[in-house]
Amino acid sequence: MNSGNPPGGVPAIELRGASKVFRTPSGEVHTAVRDLDLTVGRGEFVAVVGPTGCGKSTTLTLVSGLEEPTEGEVLIDGGPVEGIRPEVGFVFQQDAVFPWRTVLSNVAAGPRFRGVPKAEARARARDWLGRVGLAAFADRYPHQLSGGQRKRVALAQTFVNDPAILLMDEPFSALDVQTRALMSDELLELWGGSRGSRPGAQAASVVFVTHDLEEAIALADKVVVMTAGPATVKQVFPIGLPRPRKVESVRLEPQFVELYREIWACLGEEVRITRERGAARVA
């Protein structure tokens, strides 16, 4: 699926020497991300893995415009990120739904906020509910849905806005193993068909944060390994597995197993460093 950038072309996302420093409630300074260089091509699916608390989610908030870098640059289509942009979709770990709205109303909310007339917004919402297998649940409320169904609502909420860039922060981490695999397949199918109505558009450029290395390899065009915090890129691994993919079957491929071993050898060192730091603080 990845078509990257034409020669001399501008990447969809680029971070150049990006750092982010926060001040804690106690007044201490915490550096979440330091000197981060990362490029995401157009239509590319990039998975980001790293130890717990290393700064992966902060990377997403910098790209989304929810946070500004303390130093360095964050660019989308070659221009600086200055606030939240309409072409960027964000799927959070926790479901971002309005509990008092029906499923249809939740999915239609994004287009309505963007000025789309009500009838058209609802038509788009129904179309995407059909694509994620929830057409029969349009009049239900979020509390009446299973965890997997709520994640399908979250995907429909995002794709209905035709994002050119899709940021995902451990979106399936709370699901059971079987549902997680099904949702991963669903995501790949939706991503493959996410060209939408943008002129000359291709599939959305995706940055997918996860703690699950198998999930990262099964989904991505490349896997980025982050260092123990403060986060920076340690190594980038191209994933040459052919597309289209089915998550459960691709995990049985010899190439998948070899990639897992290679990437874990890199990632495992950073996980060990993080654990040792935590043990030292307790001591």
Image (cartoon, helix red, strand yellow):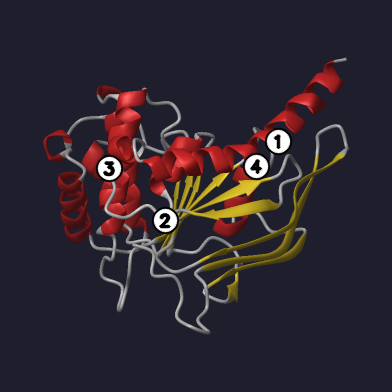
Q: Amino acid at mark 4?
A: Cys
52 with respect to 222 (left or right): right
Which residue appears at 18% of the width and 60% of the height? 120
Residue for badge 4: 266
Which tag, 3 or 4, sits closer to the chain's start? Answer: 3
Residue 240 — which label?
2
Q: Quick check: can you spot residue 86? A: yes
Q: CA distance from mark 1 to mark 2?
A: 24 Å
Of callouts 2 and 4, which one flags the residue occurring earlier in the amino acid sequence?
Answer: 2
CB of mark 4 within 8 Å of CB of mark 1?
Answer: yes
Residue at 88%, 37% in the rendered image: 27
CA–CA distance in space, label 3 to label 4? 25 Å
Residue hosting label 1: 269
Secondary structure category for the residue under label 1:
helix
Q: Quadrant of residue 205?
A: bottom left
Amino acid type of the residue tagged 1 in the rendering: Glu
Q: Which residue is mark 3?
A: 246
Q: Residue furthest top?
A: 283
